[in-house]
Image (cartoon, rainbow, N blue to C red):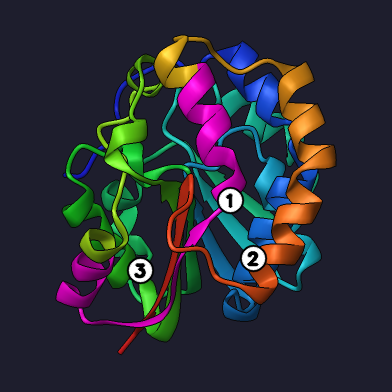
Amino acid sequence: MGNIAELTYFGRDLEAMSFAQNYHEWIADEFSPYLGKEVAEVGAGSGDFTDLILERGADRVTCFEPSSNMFPILEERHVDNSRVETMPHYLGECLEDNRERFDAAVYVNVLEHVEHDVDEVGFAHGSLKPGGHLAILVPALEWLYSDFDSQLGHYRRYRKENLVGVLEDHDFEIKAAKYFDMAGIMPWYLIMVMFNKSLNSGNVSTYDKLVIPVSRFLEGKWAPSIGKNLLVIGRKR
């Protein structure tokens, strides 16, 4: 089974990323045309992205979060929301109960945590209705892999052709495949790779407020040839 790495997420890093509101809004808007009404969010964490999915028209989101320290936060956050179902499991463990159920399956910074990521794409395919979409955002470029990636339980960073190939091998039609956040490459390389630092809320907030809006505007007009992240969307045939 393509299990997510057994780890307890670093609280300070999740707290830091919670300040990346513009970044997450950008991702959600890229995914929005493909979400439909019934969405699976795999590796939902504390549920920040869940709210963005709901804001973009989903009737219901089923959140899969196997991490023992994150699931209680996710569950508490959405305990009174009838549009959110929370599951303390891997998608693969529940596949038979969720086969061909969802209009979309969403993985935001999750697939890199999965040791057997090819199997995980197969589980996502099985959970989707015919014509449903798999929407993925992952870290990109192997040479950006840092000690910080390792500490977070990342097995890899991706190249576009490799991830596209995995989806095509599972009979997905590729609807979008592009690098994302080109401006983030140099800061990540300097801070994470060369100086071996980690995220903090101040740096994340500043980058999110000053750089992301400009990057989003520019990348909306000119698709970058490389980027810190990779976004791929496939349609189940």
Q: Quadrant of residue 3?
A: top left
User: Which image quadrant: the C terminus?
Assistant: bottom left
The answer to whether any part of residue 134 appears in the image is yes
Which residue matches tag 1?
Answer: 181
Instruction: Give the tally of numbered discs.
Output: 3
Instruction: Let me know if residue 165 is in the magenta part.
Output: yes
Q: Is residue 61 left or right of residue 52?
A: left
Could you say which is closer to the camera, residue 104 or residue 174?
174
| Residue 32 screen position, x and y as percent | 66, 72
Which residue matches tag 3?
Answer: 127
Relative to 135, does residue 67 appear above or below in the rendering? above
The reply to whether discs 2 and 1 touch (Cβ–Cβ < 8 Å) is yes
Q: Which residues are magenta?
A: 164-191
Which residue matches tag 2?
Answer: 219
As helix, strand or loop, the secondary structure at mark 2 comes to helix
Could you say which is closer to the camera, residue 225 or residue 128?
225
Of the two numbered discs 1 and 3 in the rendering, the one whose residue sits closer to the viewer: 1
Of labels 1 and 3, earlier in sequence is 3
Q: Amino acid at mark 1?
A: Asp
The span from disc 1 to disc 3 (Cα, nearest Å) is 29 Å
As helix, strand or loop, the secondary structure at mark 3 comes to helix
Q: Amino acid at mark 2?
A: Glu
**Point 80% across, 63% down: residue:** 55
